[in-house]
Image (spheres, grey):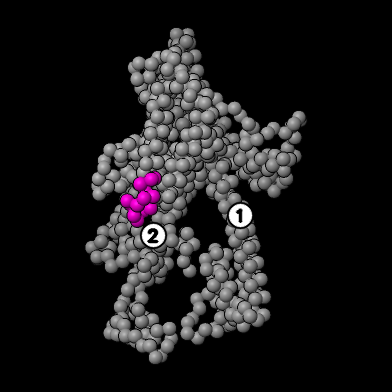
Amino acid sequence: EFSKEREKAKARGDFQKLREKQQLEEDLKGYLDWITQAEDIDPENDEEADEEGKRNTSMPTSETESVNTENVSGEGESPACCGSLCRRWRRWNRFNRRKCRAAVKSVTFYWLVIVLVFLNTLTISSEHYNQPDWLTQIQDIANKVLLALFTCEMLVKMYSLGLQAYFVSLFNRFDCFVVCGGIVETILVELEIMSPLGISVFRCVRLLRIFKVTRHWASLSNLVASLLNSMKSIASLLLLLFLFIIIFSLLGMQLFGGKFNFDETQTKRSTFDNFPQALLTVFQILTGEDWNAVMYDGIMAYGGPSSSGMIVCIYFIILFICGNYILLNVFLAIAVDNLADAESLNTAQKEEAEEKERKKNARKESLENKKSEKSESDQKKPKDSKVFILKLVSFLRSNFTDFARDKRNVQSKVGEDEEEEEDEPEVPAGPRPRRISELNMKEKITPIPEGSAFFIFSSTNPIRVGCHRLINHHIFTNLILVFIMLSSVSLAAEDPIRSHSFRNNILGYADYVFTSMFTFEIILKMTAFGAFLHKGSFCRNYFNLLDLLVVGVSLVSFGIQSSAISVVKILRVLRVLRPLRAINRAKGLKHVVQCVFVAIRTIGNIMIVTTLLQFMFACIGVQLFKGKFYKCTDEAKQNPEECRGIYIVYKDGDVDSPMVKERVWQNSDFNFDNVLSAMMALFTVSTFEGWP
């Protein structure tokens, strides 16, 4: 228990560090917003103009005349004219930056960028094998137009926010990297500097714009932030895994190099003949795909299982256990831990939003109460506020560098704290609290709702009270559970081939008894709780609706006698839902099902991120491998021009059993000719089923 509490304390500390880092970035963003908003209100120029005008009006006549007489070739008028132009330029620049900033931060601008991202993604995903030339030309034009639009977006943000404020945001840095990558790719394509393979890979950088959808999606953004926060741990684990693979690859080359050629009729794919091939073979063993076949080849390379070849299986067992069950599963542990952090971030943000809303409502109420008292002071406030904001701007400018330095220091301190050991958690005094599973909690009986049942029975009606007592009695509940079990057993005992056999007839009569009992139970529950009109009625519960569906299906199937009707067959198939009726009776099972549904709701963001990654890698696969998975049925022919005519195949390598076959240039079942086929191939690879 002490170690568990220690782990909980450490997890809470890691989450607090992540949350503090996120809050620090939000404070820095708000700090910059203050600076930019304060710069919009600049009464300094107006005050200088007013002071200049006052000086001119207060000057004596003799002085003005002397100035006018000393004016030679308009030299006195040119500084005043330049100053006026500079003031007009600053006002115009301030006005445009304010408008551009409001436009950039608007929701309309965000959705406009999302539409452009969607069009960019659609353009890339439309590429496929053997596409017509007109489609290629449209894709090139669309890519250049979209790149120009994204460049304009980046420049507008830089102008409106300023370079310093622009590069504070990680999303803006990421966007600048993607746009610059697109510009470099376009230049390389036009100048024909890079090879087509390099251009294809470089072009896929534009697919990273898909992650822009996470910017204003709080839960998805927190998930991505949590995953990125775990990169340090994952990088350390990757380094350890890479060293592990290198060591076993070198060991495999020493043990099995050049020894997998014992079967001359076929060439082995997974060998240890060179270092790159050994790396791939070790990685295949770590993933667990067909690793036993590689182990069998290693045993056969040393004479087979009847000799000393069995000793080499120790190498494969150690590699599989240490690599698969220890190192690779640590990735899953890190991911689950960071998913918990993402959920905690969502909860913390919701609580903060609710707290801000409460404070906002409280301020509104206080302002409404003091509105009459502040009416006079508000008339004098603009001038005072301008002076205050001028002082605030100078203060923020002087302290912004210190704040940014403190931010870096705090982040470095967070990195150092991760290496330090957490403080010992406090052990609570008194006995250890028992788990929920250890508590024998007494189940609460749902009371009778206030509404009437069937518009006849009131909440105090004796019949309704009696039905309520009956359905909550433990004997009745256990009896229904027994009938559910017997009904499930009868469904499993049916003969699906001979539908009119003696056994099916007996089970049919038993089905009448089960359905009658279940119908009687539903009538009792509807009488006790009501049908569906008032709160707490029978049909307001989803599990009760499942019971009603199962019983209703059985009753309808009894009413239709002809078994040739497909509807009746479907209704009878739905009887397999009967075992699910036990969920509503077994409370522990009910809680488990509810937890499953909660987990399904929470993995929605994970499915979105996974789909985005699958789509990105599918587009990269189309760029790299489109049209390259074709092969000839005759392995001796490597191109479609040679793959013609017929060839001879010897069955099982027996020269006395020749077979004549036609050469066919055919595609692989899993290919990358288009995005949909590529996503299917990647899904197969992600399941580790037959991927080598």
Q: Residue furthest left?
A: 134
Q: Is residue 108 left or right of residue 375?
A: left
**Place of residue 185 in the rendered image (x, y in percent of width and height, measured from the top left):** 39, 61
Q: 92 or 23, which lies in front?
A: 23
Taking the magenta stretch, the answer to whether it contains residue 502 is yes
Q: 453 or 51, which lies in front?
A: 453
Residue kind at label 2, given as amino acid type: Met
Residue 383 vs 99, above or below: the answer is above
Taking the magenta stretch, the answer to whether it contains residue 164 is no
Q: Which element carries disc 2, helix, strand or loop? A: helix
Residue designated by label 1: 330
Q: Residue furthest top?
A: 372
- The magenta segment is 495-507
Residue at 55% x, 69% y is 291
The N terminus lies in quadrant:
top right
**Place of residue 308 in the rendered image (x, y in percent of width and height, measured from the top left):** 67, 80
Give neighbour class at mark 2: few <14, some 14-19, many 20+ (Cα, 10 Å).
Answer: some
